[in-house]
Every structure is written in C-alpha cells, then in structure tokens.
Amino acid sequence: MHVGRCSPQAVQAPCPWARSRPRAATRIGGATHAHNGASQASEMARVQQNFNSAGVGLFFSLFGGSQSLALPHLAVPDIRHVDWEKLRAAGFRGLVFDKDNTLSQPFALEVEPRLRGALDRCLAAFEGRAVLYSNSAGLLQYDPEGAEARQLEAALGIPVLRHADKKPGGGSAELEAHFGCPASDLIMVGDRYLTDVAFGNRHGMLTVHVQPLTSRGEPLGVLLARRVEEFWVARWTAAGVHPPAHARAPYASLQGFIREPTTATAATTTPPTTATATTAAPPATAAAATKP
Ligand SMILES: [Mg+2]
C-alpha cells in the first residue's frame, strides 16, 4: 500500500493543500455580504466551486506516492447500499456527510426523495449522530451568515458544521469537538474522491464513496474535475493501490458493510445515468475491500 506523505490520523495535517485558500471572513466578509441569503450563498458556491485550490494541490501531491488518500474504503451507488447498523456495531460513532450529489441534488435544500428512507434508517442506527460537512452550506467563504446552513438543518434534520476551509483542506478539530471522539471513529460519506474521500482519509476516517446523483446543475469545473479524478482513481485501483488501513474496519471486513437495498426500495430507486456512468470508477461493491 502506498503511504501518503501526510498521516491520515493527523488532526492538523501539515499538508501543502491545507488552508491553501484565504479565510472566508477576510475574503468575502463585510458589509457587502452581511445580508446574503441562502440563495445567494448557493449561487456564489456554484460559481466558485469551479476552482478548489486545495483539491488541485492534493491532486498533484498524489503523484508523489499518496494515491491511497484518494481511494475510498467502500464504493457504492448511494447510501442505501451500506449496512449502517453493522458499521455502528463495529464501533464507529458518527457520520459526516457531504451534501451536494450525496444526499441532495446540487445546491438543493432538500434530501433526494429516493434516499429519504435510507437516510432515516442511517440516522437511527447512529442515534442521530451525524453532520453535514459541505463545500457550500456552512462554509464561511460562501455562507458566512449561515443562512443556507440553517435552511438545510431545517430541511434535512441534520446539523450543518460551520467550518473555514474547503475539503480536502482543513483539519478535523471541529468534527472531533462536535462528536467528542477522534476522527478515526467517524465515517465520511461523499461523491468526490479528491475532496470528500481525501479529506476523510487524511484524518483517519472510514471513507464511503457514492456515485453522484446527477450531473445536472453541477459547475463545469466540478464536472471536469470529476472526470479527471475518476480516471486516476480507476488507474490506481487497477494498479493495486488501496485505501489507508483502518483499525476498526480491516480490509477483510469491508465487503461485509455493503448490502443490497431491499427489493421494495430498489424497485423504485434505480440510480439515474450520470456523468460517471461510463467511467472506470469502482463498481458498486467494495472495490477497495480486497486485502492488499
Ligand atoms: Mg458532493
């Protein structure tokens, strides 16, 4: 297994991509944005998500030998395919969700309807111990007043963590303070390898990659970045690179955390065709679950 230059367990990883953007408050704060609403925050995120300097920095660092940081422990179509009760029984204590294209359509302020039941079961399994950690809502740079975060909390029933840095940059201190446990007891769930998965792996979390719900409404930069990262993740996986080892979920156990949705659910919930449907992205089952 490749070993990254930065420890996945580091709380404040001294990685070159960490905190590579100016703080939001100093960048866009001030009177001009004092009355931003949720819709303005979303629009700003839509435009500015075309560029994520932390993600770009990570991408180039991966060629130095830390490819494992971009690879998830579990790769599934969506959250219905994960045995959340089993993960809870394995000792994991909290869930960290990306929002856009993981639980909701990009920039939408509601849970994707076909995932609502699975999300409720997931939250029940973890006694509601979950947060949204988004690169739009709750990110000080785009949502300085927390307007979108509050709307999401009301709509999804999940707290939105306020944070200063875009994934994969930033530390895990805010998450550890929120959950009262080390980041290695948390599970990161998201649709992007170089943001969600890399962020989770950097901090020693178990990482779950889901296929994006749709390509509609995504910024062009995100669409292009997704293609690039899917290409390289497929290549690295084929070359035998594995995600970082996790003490609570050894490689041999990973397949056991994946399950097929119930028949009644699956009958109405076939994932739509997305921009990644024809890529070489890992299949629905735990592509990374093979012991190295
Ligand atoms: Mg996303």
Image: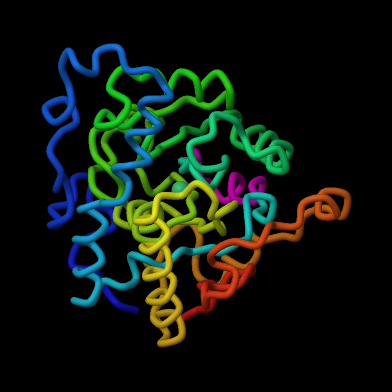
In the rendered image, residue 91 lying in the magenta stretch gets the answer: yes
132 vs 198, left or right, is: right
41 vs 56, left or right, is: right
Residue found at x 49% / y 64%: 73
Residue 291 showing in the rendered view:
yes
Looking at the rendering, which quadrant does residue 121 occupy? top right
Looking at the rendering, which quadrant does residue 154 occupy? top right
Residue interval drawn in magenta: 84-95
Q: Picture coordinates of residue 195 (x, y %)?
A: 35, 54
Q: Picture coordinates of residue 88 (x, y %)?
A: 59, 44
User: From this viewpoint, which residue is outermost toward the bottom?
Assistant: 239
Q: In which quarter of the image is the C terminus?
A: bottom left
254 vs 64, left or right, is: right
Q: In this view, does 285 lie above or below 143?
A: below
Q: Picture coordinates of residue 258 (x, y %)?
A: 66, 61
Residue found at x 26% / y 28%: 140
Residue found at x 48% / y 37%: 107
In the rendered image, residue 238 lying in the magenta stretch gets the answer: no
Residue found at x 34% / y 79%: 1
| Depth order, front residue of 243/197 | 197
Display coloring = rainbow
Residue 188 showing in the rendered view:
no
Q: In this view, does 245 lie above or below 50?
A: below
Q: Picture coordinates of residue 26 (x, y %)?
A: 11, 27
Q: In this view, does 42 lie above or below 11?
A: above
245 vs 76, left or right, is: left
